[in-house]
Image: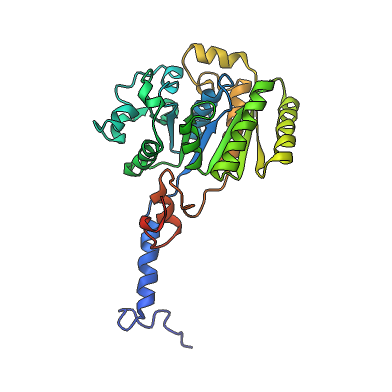
């Protein structure tokens, strides 16, 4: 009995060029950084617990084994460092001034998350133009550390920075609570994102609810209005209950997922993290300005370069 040689040309001499090209492309894909899942956490108004959601979602994802980076994108009124009792010496204002690179601003946070701090009380940072927002987004391409998930904690409302950052992510998570102003302002934010900025899907988190039924009822109210007037898909991301342990954690300047891991709020954030971990990561760039765009390009679009995409 004889067997055919599984590799009749082990030296590669005479191997068609396209096979070498395929092998080279495969090696490049293997060595390319993994695409980063980027989630913007936004709200139509302040006071709905948005930054608490960003912090605790980040910590819960890190506790599940993910490499997580949290960007404080409320550029002129930083809140993440206050919630966690941090005192960063450098922040995004120093990056924009050209004093340092983004890497030098990074601060370690709970559960191993990495935080990109914003400035506090710097009026100029709250009034940046679109070109400066693009500069911040592109600065993330300078980072070479492993990152699985980037959480972008935006400012509240319809500020230009909110719209710029929400356009530059794959997932927009809108936090809403069951009061008329929160629902109205969440609808206004979703309307602007969908009509003017091409955001076709928004995930909704009901926060500070008295039970799961209230969360679903709140989502149903918002969905009914959006379905009537907008061409946008809303997905229910779940709910977080009103929890006294969350208030205690804020007073201690800790994430509730770390300070009180068995509390109702902490369990809800862990459920949200498990849910978010299943959200799809795109195989390639959308063509817009995006966070970590080179990792999307390298992972999914073969040999197309960054110059192939409009800005």
Seen from the viewer's position, the closer of residues 271 and 86 is: 86
Q: Position of residue 95 (x, y in %)?
A: 30, 32
Is 246 placed above or below 212 here?
A: above
| Residue 260 falls left or right of residue 289 | right
Residue 203: image quadrant is top right
Looking at this view, name the residue that lies furthest to the left: 99
| Residue 170 falls left or right of residue 81 | right
Q: Residue at x 75, y 36 (%)?
A: 224
Q: How many marks?
A: 0
Q: Position of residue 149 (x, y in %)?
A: 47, 39
Q: Position of residue 22 (x, y in %)?
A: 40, 70
Q: Position of residue 162 (x, y in %)?
A: 49, 33
Q: How is the image coloured?
A: rainbow
| Residue 216 falls left or right of residue 37 | right
Q: Residue at x 50, y 21 (%)?
A: 255
Is 307 placed above or below 178 here?
A: below
Is residue 7 visible to the viewer in this orientation of the structure?
A: yes
Is residue 240 visible to the viewer in this orientation of the structure?
A: no
Q: Residue at x 61, y 20 (%)?
A: 263
Seen from the viewer's position, the closer of residues 47 and 30 is: 47
């Amino acid at each position: 009995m004889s067997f055919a040689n599984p590799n009749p040309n082990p030296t590669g001499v005479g191997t068609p060029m396209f096979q070498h090209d395929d092998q080279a492309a495969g090696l490049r894909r293997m060595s390319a950084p993994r695409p980063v899942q980027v989630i913007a956490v936004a709200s139509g108004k302040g006071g709905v617990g948005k930054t608490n959601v960003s912090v605790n979602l980040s910590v819960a994802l890190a506790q599940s084994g993910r490499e997580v980076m949290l960007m404080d994108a409320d550029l002129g009124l930083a809140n993440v460092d206050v919630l966690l009792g941090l005192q960063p010496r450098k922040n995004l204002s120093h990056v924009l001034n050209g004093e340092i690179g983004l890497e030098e601003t990074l601060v370690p946070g709970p559960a191993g998350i990495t935080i990109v701090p914003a400035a506090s009380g710097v009026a100029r940072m709250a009034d940046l133009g679109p070109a400066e927002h693009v500069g911040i987004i592109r600065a993330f391409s300078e980072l070479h550390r492993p990152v699985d998930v980037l959480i972008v904690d935006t400012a509240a409302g319809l500020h230009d920075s909110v719209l710029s950052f929400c356009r530059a992510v794959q997932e927009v998570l809108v936090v809403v609570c069951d009061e008329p102003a929160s629902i109205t302002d969440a609808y206004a934010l979703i309307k602007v994102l969908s009509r003017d900025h091409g955001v076709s899907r928004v995930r909704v988190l009901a926060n500070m609810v008295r039970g799961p039924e209230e969360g679903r009822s709140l989502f149903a109210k918002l969905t009914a209005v959006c379905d009537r007037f907008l061409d946008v898909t809303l997905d229910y991301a779940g709910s977080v209950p009103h929890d006294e342990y969350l208030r205690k954690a804020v007073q201690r300047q800790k994430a509730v997922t770390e300070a009180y891991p068995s509390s109702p709020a902490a369990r809800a954030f862990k459920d949200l993290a498990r849910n978010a971990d299943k959200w799809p990561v795109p195989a390639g760039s959308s063509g817009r300005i995006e966070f970590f765009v080179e990792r999307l390009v390298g992972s999914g679009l073969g040999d197309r370069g960054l110059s192939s995409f409009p800005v």
